[in-house]
Amino acid sequence: MADPSSYRPRPGEIPDSPGVYRFRDEHRRVIYVGKAKSLRQRLANYFQDLAHLHPRTRTMVTTAASVEWTVVSTEVEALQLEYSWIKEYDPRFNVKYRDDKSYPYLAVTMNEEFPRVQVMRGHKKKGVRYFGPYGHAWAIRDTVDLLLRVFPVRTCSAGVFKNAARTGRPCLLGYIGKCSAPCVGRITPEDHWDLADEFCDFMAGRTGTYLRRLERQMAEAAEDMEYERAARLRDDIGALKKAMEKSAVVLADATDADLIAVAEDELEAAVQIFHVRGGRVRGQRGWVTDKVEEITTGALVEHALQQLYGEESGDAVPKEVLVPALPDPVEPVQQWLTGRRGSGVSLRIPQRGDKKALMETVQRNAQQALVLHKTKRASDLRTRSRALEEIAEALDLDSAPLRIECYDISHLQGDDVVASMVVFEDGLARKSEYRRFQIKGFEGQDDVRSMHEVITRRFRRYLAEKEKTGEWADGEELTDGGRHPGGEAVVAGPSAPDDGEALTHGPALKDDDGRPKRFAYPPQLVVVDGGQPQVAAAQRALDELGIDDIAVCGLAKRLEEVWLPREDDPVVLPRTSEGLYLLQRVRDEAHRFAITYQRAKRAKRFRAGPLDDVPGLGETRKQALIKHFGSVKRLRAATIDQICEVPGIGRKTAETVAAALAGATPAGPAVNTATGEIMDDEDGAPETTTDAPGEPVSAGTPDERRGQER
């Protein structure tokens, strides 16, 4: 525990101007980011008597080892920089709203030739119109199912659309009238785009005009005795009204607004947001956060606004934002929101009428969310604490292992050998620190040797990072000179490619900038998937590196026994033990992560084509060539002049492509394994056998393949 006075800046050193400050721990990791109208006055609050500080603020300043600041011109700039650094550094002591899911949106891809209606999650894309968020994906599908009767917009995937266009037969929705079937030319691209635009207008709340138009058309059809058409229009009106009933009118003046309510106690706060568009509640979402320091309701609202609109722009930021308390000062936040929207935004507290009544409803939702969260968390915290204590007691550790790393090896009969590293902190998965390794030190199948290589590489990197941060005592030297093993390929994240590049969930890493480093933080416990041999290999790797303060154990699958280094008998935890359950979850997560990576590598290898070996030919130009010629077969038959016609392909590249394809052996004919039919080469892909869409696997029965793969 650090003494804040040891790193307190000297008097007069801190400027009396707006800025953003960062507290760092002993590892140079940023643990807290804040902004201030006056840096001098704000930072002075942290260096007072510890007894006068909020308990969590006291924990933060005693965990920190240094503080630094950046001066800016205005409070708006400070707000923007604070948000950017919180997203970049992910400080552990900042207010972070924990959201256990990515809320689904109803999205219309207006950036495509034939716009598609679908459910989307995650980051928003340019040119796509979003409606929501919704609490559940099924709510979106129910709404779309009703509206497709009136607005038969395309909902199929690109693969289904292309297949229907190739065969000339639409899908089932096209036959039952819930799709206008643009894939087979029943509607022009322009008319389909207009249809999608009308769908968006209706979802945006402009419903009255469209309903009145349909009612007028129905009356005209009845007068002309076109009773079948009148009946269809009547049913369309009924479907639209039923869809509108799903979102009740709450504000009569067709207001577009977001209402934010906060429920809090001394330790935590819950935030609820109602998204009102066209006077109707179009979506609801909520977050819960720990209160790191004594923070006002207005400051909680400010953090919620950053979370909501930090990556939004245009109409995604409503004209009106209603809150229970205003940030202090409110002007910089209001200017920031106006800049995000591009026009004026009203940030205020509702005082009377329908908006105040709706705010009370949102407030009740926030109170219920906080009560529910505290009920769940109390049980969850007790369970996780008991599990960690049981592991510490069973393995004879000095303290509970707050950070656990687990390693697993995966391969298919010795091919595509990979390893995974998963991290659990306080009993919860920390997926941003998962890592994946490609075994390159040797060829073939040897789990023990693979485990030794992975542990060596991981902790050699830890020692190298430790040396960079200056944590070595006088006279100590880095084992093996801190050299990284040759050919190392380490990647991070569940979808990172195996291209030898170390990827992270953020900008490129530097040595001393406080970003989450790849291997800088050691675990208290290393768990390996396996028995005595794997445990011995992991312990030997640590011994060779001179690391003696990290515990090692292994969890064998057969009897769920826990093996310790240099012990002949395993530790057997009771089947009902929370500690055993936690170790099993850690081990199973490592296995899942490893086998997912192994399958992805194998699929990538099977999908490799002759164009992959052409030097200097990237993915964009490969796709351009295939799109222009239709298949590798046709590209192989093309002349150099014809290849040069493709945008972005010069003559030298065309000659290289032609030479590469001339020397490549054409792939064998594709065979439909269900019918035995020999299919034409349409995409130039080599023949593969699959037991799941898009996942090539080896030959043999499914049971045989499962036995070969681990």
Image (cartoon, rainbow, N blue to C red):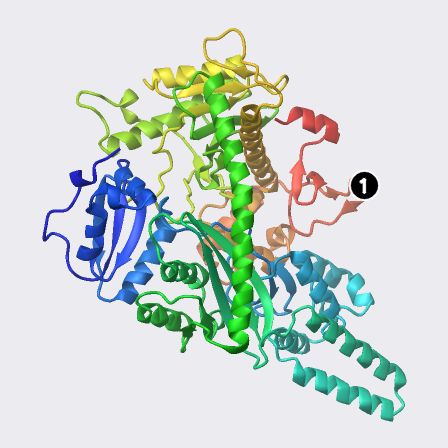
How many numbered callouts? 1
Picture quarter containing residue 277? bottom right
Tell me the residue at 62%/64% (across/down): 106
Q: Which kind of residue does numbered mark 1 sit on?
A: Ala
Residue 393 vs 437, above or below: the answer is above
Q: Residue 401, can we see it?
A: yes
Q: Would residue 315 be found to the left or right of residue 517 on screen?
A: right
Residue 95, percent from left and from top = 39, 51
Picture quarter containing residue 194? bottom right
Residue 133, percent from left and from top = 57, 62
Residue 189 vs 25, above or below: the answer is below
Residue 509, percent from left and from top = 33, 44
Could you say which is closer to the camera, residue 382 or residue 95? Answer: 382
- Tag 1's secondary structure? loop
Could you say which is closer to the camera, residue 523 or residue 61? Answer: 61
Residue linked to disc 1: 674
Local packing at callout 1 (Cα closer than 10 Å; few below 14, some 14-19, many 20+) is few
Q: Residue 442, can we see it?
A: no
Could you say which is closer to the camera, residue 664 or residue 172? Answer: 172
Picture quarter containing residue 625? bottom right
Tell me the residue at 59%/58% (across/down): 104
Looking at this view, name the residue that lies furthest to the top. 568
Could you say which is closer to the camera, residue 345 or residue 43? Answer: 43
Quadrant placement of the N terminus = top left
Quadrant placement of the C terminus = top right
